[in-house]
Image: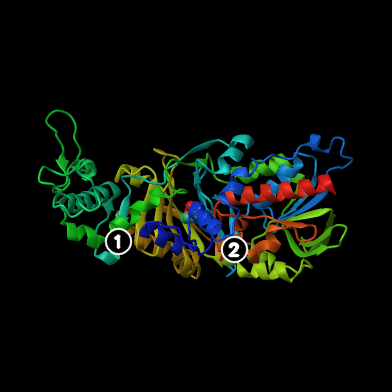
Amino acid sequence: MAQLQSRPAASRRSFLRSVGLTGGAGAMFATMGALGLAPTAQAAQREQPYRAPGPGDFTLTGRAAAKVVVVGGGIAGLTAAYELGKAGYDCTVLEARDRAGGRNFTVRGGDTTVDLYGNRQTARFTAGQYMNAGPARIPQWMVTLDYCRELGVPVEVFTNSNADAYLYNESAGMTAPVRYRTAKADVYGYVSELLAKATDKGALDAELTSADRERLMEFLKDWGELGDTLTYEGGERRGYSVVPAAAGTPGVLLGDVPAASEVFASGIGRYFSFEFGFDQAMLMFQPVGGMDRIPRALTKAIGAHRVRTGAAVTKITDTGGGVTVTYTQGGRTRAVDADYCVAALPPNILAKIPHNLGSGVQSALEAITPSSAGKIGLEYRSRWWELDHRIYGGITETDLDVTHIWHPSYGFHGERGVVIGYYNYGTDADAYAQLTPKERERRAVAAGVKIYGDAYRTELASSFSHHWRQTPHLEAAWHSTPGGPDHVRYRPLNEPAGRVHFAGDWLSYTDAWQHGAFTSARRAVTALHARVLSS
Ligand code: PHE
């Protein structure tokens, strides 16, 4: 995303920075509008809802659906073919990898990958177990859910935040993890105490009327569970060491409440704002059975015969009257001639493919930089996190190089499960990528043992790791588009270059989300179809 900053809480800002993304879409869009870089609020309000091309659009126009070659079979490319197909366009999708979906990649037992360093892995996950190596969570507002509905892909809740998951900051001296609920009780408790005391002493009198003051005090007492003397003394929000049960078992509250300075020193508060994020707030969703249900359903709707896998594009030529795309498949060079092309490859890959689309296109592509991210799936023989830790889904946050540990949001109470042992970015992801898959596993497990104990090692059945920057034909988890997608520098990509239209999440305000790919594809399809209808 662009470098323009929104006004997020420090944690969100640093989170976004750490993943190579900055600026919330809404805030950034508003800022850009103010700078005259983006369509104004009025223009945005006037924007028509998406209308899919239909065969009836050609009635009485004397025009007909054209032939379109789609370069790249990720979500943007598949969506372009799917939407154009609704009006009878003759689409061919060229996909370099052996499966469509792009970064939407679900790993199951038997799946094999080879990374750019030559590491070959075959997943040994047992039946029904999988990891989403790429996209894995969908907010309710994203168009991705509309596509799931339209394509008949069932969805279920993805647990993005869980009061019983852990926080662990080793660098702050923590020797044991703390549960979110405990951390929140303590941080909110002490922040409320301090603010209540300051308010009570009159420190905020210049800011508040006496009615405001009263209401603020009411709020703080409740928010921080403060006692009569406006002090935080812990309570049941922190949790129990023995949970309340039948008569005779009132429960035992968790041990000593740490002092305020200990709580602040632990740095645990930095994780809370994540769940306020417009794109990360619960509820979140996932397709039942794996994220790749989406590209599979798209491929089926398009017609599998139209999607050529193992087809690596070598040249894109605008011939004036059409487009010729050459590619290699099974060692042979082939070509597709079409009326139009939708180029839906990542910009860093597109930039390496010879074309005659102009230097403006090339320099725009080169201005967009790839980012790293990786994940490891750890299959366990038992669901010890449910049995021993009472954690059902959700994310444990750490300051270790594994960054995030995800508990599976499917298969609860089953025999086995796949934990995401790391989901990390940038230099952490690249450092793991440089290890052999076995070493990645060893390092990730050693980190997890610090938080969860020995079961993290002893119950492990197998692992599979995936790093996007090191994945052939993709070479990025997502991208950084300095200035945002509407910066004048990217105009050659937001307009057709001759007969080539561009699409991808990287040309959206929601890069690193399928929503960006879907909406960008819709934008390209709308422009292409309007052109065909009027030319
Ligand atoms: N969509 C990805 C995820 O949810 C990457 C991302 C992370 C995008 C954080 C924006 C913010 O993990």
Q: Is residue 131 left or right of residue 324?
A: left
Determine the residue located farthest toward the left in the rendered image: 229
**Quick check: is the Cβ at mark 1 less than 8 Å away from ligand 1?**
no
**Quick check: is the Cβ at mark 2 less than 8 Å away from ligand 1?**
no
Local crowd at mark 1 within 10 Å, few (<14), some, or many (≥20)?
some
Mark 2: amino acid: Thr
- Percent x, y of residue 373: 50, 62
- Percent x, y of residue 507: 62, 57
Q: Nearer the viewer, residue 31 or 161?
A: 31
Residue 110, can we see it? no
Q: Which residue is mark 1?
A: 169
Residue 393, placed above or below residue 55: below
Q: Is residue 244 left or right of residue 39?
A: left
Q: Is residue 526 left or right of residue 239?
A: right
Mark 1, secondary structure of its residue: loop
Q: Residue at x 60, y 65 (%)?
A: 475
- Percent x, y of residue 390: 31, 42
Mark seen at residue 239: none
Q: Is residue 403 left or right of residue 83?
A: left
Mark seen at residue 471: 2
Residue 305, can we see it? yes
Q: Residue at x 44, y 43 (%)?
A: 409
Mark 1: amino acid: Asn
